Image (cartoon, rainbow, N blue to C red):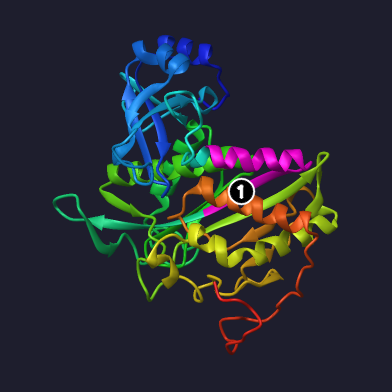
Amino acid sequence: CAMKYTADEVIQFVEEENVKFIRLAFCDIYGRQKNISIMPGELRRAFSDGMAFDASAIAGFGGAVRSDLFLRPDPSTLTGLPWRPENGRVVRMFCDITRPDGRVFEADTRHLLKVAVEDAQAAGYRFSFGAEMEFYLFKTDEHGEPTREPYDHAGYMDIAPDDRGENIRREICLTLEQMGIRPESSHHEQGPGQNEVDFRYTGALTAADHLLGFKAAVKSIAAQSGLYASFLPKPFLEYSGSGLHINLSLFQDGKNLFAHGAPEMDHFMAGLLAHACDITAFLNPLTNSYARFGAFEAPKYATWSRGNRSQLIRIPAARGEYSRIELRSPDPACNPYLALALIIHAGLDGIADALPLTPPVDINLYDAEPSNAYPLL
């Protein structure tokens, strides 16, 4: 289901492809995916009127008073769930959330990202996002519960048989392709049982949808192999944490501004640095998130550099259409819709105010003495 569907096409697809369950998915403010499953006979009503649900038990959605909200599926997000049985297929769509009178629900973080994209378009800009997400694979006990024992003890970019995650990553990447998500590469990471999958560039909303779908796919595929996939930012203090490195490019009139050294690039980076401390609360939402900073190539200060992996913002060596900046602080625990929305707004703020960019810091900050020159994240 990689193509973009309309509502009528979704209905036709469900009828022709023996789809028996349609999951209407959304996430709470913490980025945890939720869903309700409807039968094919309810699909037309879901598109025309939305499906009501009790939001009182969803984190951040308010209490029992006026708790009725509606899920309105976005047909362009239709995808099959390949790990579910072929006989009686299951598909999923992400949804917009509204109040009973049709007003947008203010805690719908997917809508907040839509607003950020619209604000960028109004200013004449378009973004492309590519993500690199890390996770750990742990063994499970005889009851299927996760243990603290990693799946292997391989290191960075090791190969099989030391790298036991190779087949799992293969299955993940093939599954993602079936879902219309394009992985670019995958490899074993530094920590024992730690893996990384990198994604091809897409627009902001699609990138966030893909990140949410990716976590669900990884957890499901790992579980089928008797493993537990953890997206905790720092499962082991003595090993590298798991980051969500966000690569982005900025376009105007079809031109990648980062490829041409446009002043907007400096202003955008300055905006990110200026707001880094504020948005870190959302890009790194767990107490555990902060154990990751300042070691194993995870940043700790609001600085930038070219190629230096100890910095908050890194400018990779890629050229031409692949010119981009990399924000290295986010971790997989974040709500991807909030994270990308805040990154867009912070950068646009820097452009609007023509904020000057501080000089690059071309030192290894892990070895440097503490300084008051750079705000601590």
Report the front residue among 97 and 164: 97
Taking depth in this image into account, of 186 and 123 the one nearest to the observer is 123
Q: Is residue 240 visible?
A: no
**Within the image, what quadrant is residue 285 found in?**
bottom left
Q: Residue furthest bottom?
A: 369
Comparing 373 with 296, the one in front is 373
Q: Of helix, strand and loop, which one carries label 1?
A: strand
Compared to residue 24, the image places residue 150 above or below, namely below
Count of picture labels: 1
What's the residue at 58%, 49% (across, down)? 340
Q: Quick check: 301 above or below 185?
A: below
Q: Does residue 57 show up magenta in the picture?
A: no
Q: Is residue 221 shown left or right of residue 80?
A: left
Q: From where the camera sits, is residue 195 visible?
A: yes
Residue at point 53%, 63% (across, down) = 280
Q: In this picture, is 39 found above or below 194? A: above
Image height of 157 relative to 218, above or below: below
For this rendering, which residue is in front, 112 or 35? 112
Q: Position of residue 32 (x, y in %)?
A: 38, 45
Write the residue at 51% across / 35% down: 177
Q: Position of residue 305 (x, y in %)?
A: 70, 71
Q: Indicate whether residue 130 is drawn in magenta.
A: yes
What residue is rendered at 58% in x and 63% in y?
328
Q: Position of residue 161 (x, y in %)?
A: 38, 59
Q: Amino acid at mark 1?
A: Gly
Q: Which residue is mark 1?
A: 130
- Give left or right: position of 206 versus 274: left
Pick out the residue farthest to the front: 65
Q: Is residue 38 left or right of residue 177?
A: left
Segment colored magenta: 111-132
* Quadrant housing the C terminus: bottom right
